[in-house]
Image (cartoon, rainbow, N blue to C red):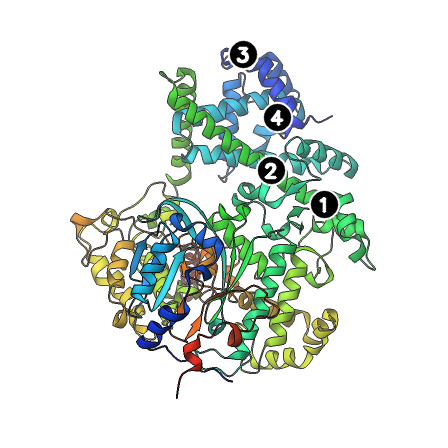
Amino acid sequence: MSVELKPASKYERKIFYKEEWNVKDVPDFIRNSLTSREFGFDHYGNGPNDRYKVFVDDLRLKRFIKVKQPFAAYCSVAFYDKPNQRKGWQKSELVFDVDAKDIPIRTCDCAEGEVCEKCLNQAKEIVLMIRDVLSGDFGLTNINLIYSGRGYHVRVLDEDVMDASSELRGDIIQYVTGSKLPDLSNEYGFNDLQPFIIPFGYPKNFTRWSKYTILHLRRSSKLDDVNNQLLRDVLKHRNLLQEDLWGMFRSNIGPIRYKKVMNAISRINMQITDTKVSIDLKRILRLPSTLHSKVSMKSTLIKNIETFDPFDDAVPKFVYERND
Amino acid sequence: MIETSFINPFSFEAKEIVRKLGQIENLDKKNDSLIDIIKHTHSQKLSSIPETLEQLALHKFQWYLDKKTDNFDDKVYEYLFNPEIYEYDVLSFYFLCQAVAIGFGEDSHEAKQVVELEANLIDNRLERLKSEPNNFQYSFLKEALNQLIDTNNVYWNDLKEVIDLGVIDLNKLLLSNGRVIIEYEDFIEEYGHLIEHRNPQTMYEVICGLNLKKNLLKSIIMKKTRDYIVKVAENSRRMVEPDSIMNELSGKIRQMEQKARERRFGSSNSGAYNDNGPAPYIQEAFPPCVRKCMEGIKSGGRNDAIVLFLTPFISYARLAPNVFSMEYDMKVSDVDPSLEITHKEVIPMIYEAANACRPPLFKDQPQEKININSKLGFGMNSELKLSEEGETRWYTPMSCEKIKLHMPNLCIPCVDCKKIGNPLIYYNRKKRLLEKNNSKATAGEEK
């Protein structure tokens, strides 16, 4: 059955929160730190205006949500001494926000601001790549993947990153999403060293992301400083990257033009996640388990990303009961 | 033989030196051994040499300040790179840290300068270490570094504060499961099986090797220096009476800075200092990010682009383009007392860009006008009133790095952006270049 991503009516919200939503579906990593977090609510679909809320226990949170049936519910990634005043910042989750509607290299034909199965799948691929780098390179283990309704949130709760400054988070994003050209300058006379010959560390990660981006480019893609002819050549030769034949790809494009392409690709990589969310230490994020009313999907903690399918696992019951 | 304390004032050996010779009464005593070392330093100019530890500390600070000037003579300070000076160097390092901590506090400009001074000294000394054989460099760096971290067993999160200093790029570290690969034996164990058709040793040298160790050593010492200054500053606040000798030393540092500032800016005719006041817009000199923003931004990135990015740029570009060379927080009224320029030129230009957004910013978000006022330093108020100025800070233009993170769409660097860290710096340089070209063209026409 195909699911239409259309807004939920007030009645549908009511049904969802009355019959389907359960406070126990709020992930443990939030319920265990309820009193340190700020909650925010959007009651009318105009943005989260009702902020600075704090709940001392599950019961209070449950009561509030069941009664108010909010358009959207959020909670802070930050832990505070006084969350009701947003004061006494202790630490913040490290977050990567991959919104399917904002992926810069979508391969689907969605209109701006809309999402479909194809771009949601792409968001999932991106999330998996992010998770691999966070665990493989950074050794992080407390990585929670959330389906947000129109994309995914990667929420990292390892103590090692929770006290990181905004600047350090910026560096981590650049590393994780391969959004900076690796600086391989050296004093040993190797002036033309390319990241793709280095099978480890950041150069490997950069190459992986670049491959992903190039393989997802379309004829209509817009790359800074890359004209139509160059884009055509990239598309013509990109099959070489399936076999990791980067040297041949580069020589077919030409080294100077290749440099232009890689510069543009690194900038695209930077847009794969919403960097503003990651560097903001006081952000509020959609509360997992609640309804994304704009698309009638549930924000859901993902237990197994390999088998997770938003159109099976995040669709509220009322959607199946719609007549139209 | 080069002692590790010549590079690292936090080495075991350095601590021993401080314990033996670090009495404060030695500070202003003439030190014959120090003088002897300086006099016997190769290529050393002998016109003005430090004779006491206090003078040595001040000379080091002077070296740091002089280096930024055009008439810097490195032969005056050759002794700073003579490894034999290590004992006195360590002592002067601690005296200098204490003086700035007690006299200026841990967050002062002077404290930052001392941290930077130490980093520059290490850079220069390590540069000279390059003339030594590779084996020596490796064993020296290994010993120096291992007194600070266990290079076979360090994790990236142990280096968080060090990375925060910005000297080491996170993406220059080889990370595996959180561990940072620093030593060759670990490199081979971790990645050896992945390397084909290339010499692993060369690969190691190029990707990390000595350079990584040098940068790590320098950054860790910078962090430790900062921590030490913080500790001294905190302790000094608990003291009933601050140490008069240290206060005297910090007073001399203050005078030295004042003179350096006069030298740098006093007789400058470069035009740089003249732009401290309002200067007309030269829109031709606007960087690509500002031009893009002026053309209007589409929904999603409008607010940050207009309020956080464009407002500070447009206001400082017109009112105080050289804000980064000033060492105090400015107010708009310092440079535009009647707010005439702000009302007639600055605000209209910001509003024009806001209206060019798709949809126009104020159409659905009129509250952003208040946010713009607040970024100009006039608090969260709907009008710019002098009486409300100071309720918020006048935001300085954000750096290129921050722009890339906050608004990656805006940053499409052109050739002139190379090595520029802030759009306002771009604007100032480009303006100067344009002025230069114009005057050449005029001169050509006159001929």
Q: Nearer the viewer, residue A133 or A247?
A: A133
Q: Chain of mark 4?
A: B
Asked if the residue under mark 2 is in contact with the one under mark 3, i.e. CB atoms within 8 Å, the reply is no
Q: In this rendering, which labeled residue sits more in front, label 4 or label 1?
A: 1
Residue B361, given in percent of the width and then of the height, sits at 30, 70
Check the image and report above or below for B252 versus B435.
above
Rate crowding at label 1 as few (under 14), some (14 to 19) or many (20 or more) other CA atoms within 10 Å.
Answer: some
What's the distance in space between the residues labelled 4 and 2, CA to CA?
20 Å
**What residue is shown at x 68% (from left), y 36% (from top)?**
B150
Helix or strand or loop: what does disc 4 sit on? Answer: helix
Say the numbered circle drawn on residue B209.
1
Residue visible at 64% across and 23% down?
A: B12
- The residue identified by callout 3 is B30
Check residue A193 in the rendering and tell me which mark sits there, or answer none. Answer: none
Q: What SS does tag 1 mark?
A: helix
Q: Is residue B313 visible?
A: no
Which residue is identified by label 4? B79
Picture coordinates of residue B206 (x, y %)? 72, 51
Chain for disc number 1: B
B436 and A305: which is toward the camera: A305
The kind of residue tagged 4 is: Tyr
Q: Secondary structure at mark 2?
A: helix
